[in-house]
């Protein structure tokens, strides 16, 4: 009898401890949840209080307002390969793209007669943002041969991405060469086989592909690129 | 609304830095207080939930297209919600065996992503669809999305290790 009651007391004691532990765990979980919710709410409140008034979106032009409406004649080029030396399109005639710059002045890319260096730039692209100042410096230093023309194509237009609008960026970087504004579908870029930006297409005087290069190239490669089409 | 969400995530990232420092110090001294050891797994779960929810909000609502490296970090982060959530419910102190390797992989990818953000030339040309060098968010001057992911991974790994000291 005594042994049974002792065992029962022990069991009751264990059960009581178990219940107390469970209760403590429930309290602890509730406390964690409350603290978590408070931290979350505080973060949102700080977010609301510290984020300033949104910029005046009306003053910023939209993609469709910036985009041009270029016409493209000729066969589109295939996608540019990563290794320019394996480019199957070398020697092929480039499509002729006619459109306008940001001010509506006419700009043409690919017309036979004058060799061209065409740089496809996306204002939001960090690699383009690094490349353009290099190009401006190279141009200012007289790197471009007299018989070669440089033309930029503002492409991959997207007003939801940083560094918008592109015309402000070109101006801030001091680039004052011609800029052909691509359409919302990046048709000119697609016709020239753009895979990534920045993208360079060196076109000889006959309007044929000399070299196509994707990625940043720097001033030395710019010299080499210009030399390939100079005098053609 | 998205700007508020971005700022809120940045504030939470700062909170996560503080938590990591506290948990890391406790780990180094090998004497995590009982409340921290008990809170470690729920906290780590909360961080994984916020990181997962945040990444989905920014891609699906804000329309920020995830790049390849973002996807790799997601692959490391998303399972942690389940792994840590179940471990927190069960009081499983061995969750670190899964969460630390996953967090380590995610942190390594996040570091490479941050490097590309800071030096775009490391990442090569920009993929027009989703370049990894594109900085969608920059809060307080340094908190970009992979930076916040890195903070999340380090916090989760540290807390998972602290949870080893949890009382049975």
Image (cartoon, coloured by chain):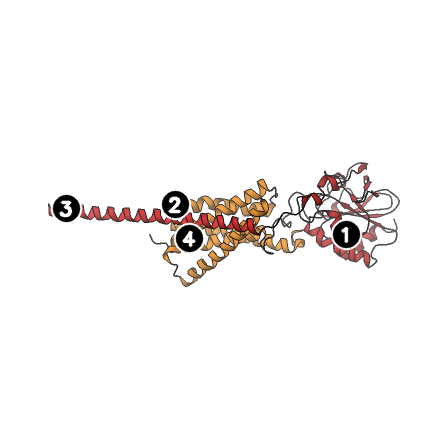
Chain colours: A red, B orange
Give percent across and percent down for residue A22: 31, 46
Give percent across and percent down for residue A110: 83, 42
> Could you classify mark 4 by the number of other residues whose Cα lies within 10 Å: few (under 14), some (14-19), or many (20 or more)?
many
Instruction: Assign a secondary structure to mark 3.
Output: helix
Q: CA distance from mark 2 to mark 3?
A: 36 Å
Do badges 1 and 4 share one subunit?
no
Q: Which mark is residue B11?
A: none
Point 43% across, 62% down: residue: B28
Q: CA distance from mark 3 to mark 1?
A: 93 Å
Residue at the disc numbered 2: B89
Which of the two residues, A15 or A130, is positioned nearer the viewer here?
A: A15
Question: Mark 1 belongs to which subunit?
Answer: A
> Could you classify mark 2 by the number of other residues whose Cα lies within 10 Å: few (under 14), some (14-19), or many (20 or more)?
few
Relative horizontal placement of residue B81, taking residue A7 as reference (left or right): right
Question: Mark 3 belongs to which subunit?
Answer: A
Q: CA distance from mark 2 to mark 1?
A: 58 Å
Q: CA distance from mark 2 to mark 4?
A: 12 Å
Instruction: Assign a secondary structure to mark 2.
Output: helix
Question: Mark 4 belongs to which subunit?
Answer: B
> Looking at the picture, does residue A74 appear above or below residue A147?
above
Q: Quadrant of residue B27?
A: bottom left
Of badges 3 and 1, nearer the viewer stands 1
Q: CA distance from mark 3 to mark 4?
A: 41 Å
Q: CA distance from mark 1 to mark 4?
A: 52 Å
Relative horizontal placement of residue B140, taking residue A134 as reference (left or right): left
Residue at the disc numbered 1: A171
């Amino acid at each position: 009898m005594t042994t049974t009651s002792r065992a029962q007391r022990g069991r009751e004691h264990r059960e009581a401890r178990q219940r107390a532990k469970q209760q403590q765990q429930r309290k602890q979980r509730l406390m964690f949840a409350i603290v978590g919710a408070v931290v979350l709410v505080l973060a949102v409140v700080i977010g609301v209080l510290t984020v300033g008034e949104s910029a005046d979106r009306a003053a910023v032009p939209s993609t469709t307002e910036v985009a041009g409406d270029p016409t493209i004649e000729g066969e589109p080029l295939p996608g540019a390969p990563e290794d320019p030396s394996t480019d199957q399109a070398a020697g092929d005639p480039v499509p002729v793209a006619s459109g306008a710059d940001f001010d509506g002045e006419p700009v043409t890319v690919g017309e036979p007669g004058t060799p061209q260096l065409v740089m496809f730039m996306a204002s939001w692209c960090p690699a383009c943002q690094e490349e353009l100042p290099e190009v401006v410096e190279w141009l200012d230093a007289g790197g471009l041969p007299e018989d070669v023309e440089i033309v930029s194509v503002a492409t991959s237009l997207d007003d939801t991405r940083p560094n918008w609008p592109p015309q402000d960026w070109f101006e801030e970087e001091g680039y004052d060469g011609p800029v052909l504004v691509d359409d919302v579908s990046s048709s000119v870029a697609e016709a020239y086989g753009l895979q990534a930006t920045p993208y360079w297409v060196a076109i000889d005087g006959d309007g044929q592909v000399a070299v196509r290069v994707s990625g940043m190239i720097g001033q030395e490669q710019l010299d080499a690129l210009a030399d390939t089409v100079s005098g053609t | 609304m998205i700007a508020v969400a971005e700022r809120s995530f940045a504030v939470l990232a700062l909170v996560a830095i503080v938590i990591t420092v506290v948990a890391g110090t406790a780990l180094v001294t090998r004497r995590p207080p009982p409340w921290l050891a008990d809170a470690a797994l729920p906290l780590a779960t909360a961080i994984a939930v916020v990181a997962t929810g945040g990444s989905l909000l920014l891609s699906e609502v804000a329309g920020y297209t995830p790049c390849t490296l973002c996807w790799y970090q997601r692959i490391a982060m998303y399972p942690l919600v389940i792994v840590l959530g179940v471990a927190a419910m069960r009081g499983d102190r061995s969750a670190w065996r899964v969460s630390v390797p996953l967090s380590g992989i995610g942190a390594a990818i996040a570091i490479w992503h941050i490097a590309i953000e800071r030096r775009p030339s490391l990442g090569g040309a920009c993929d027009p669809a989703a370049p990894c060098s594109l900085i969608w968010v920059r809060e307080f001057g340094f908190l970009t999305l992979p930076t916040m992911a890195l903070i999340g991974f380090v916090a989760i790994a540290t807390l998972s290790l602290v949870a080893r000291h949890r009382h049975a």
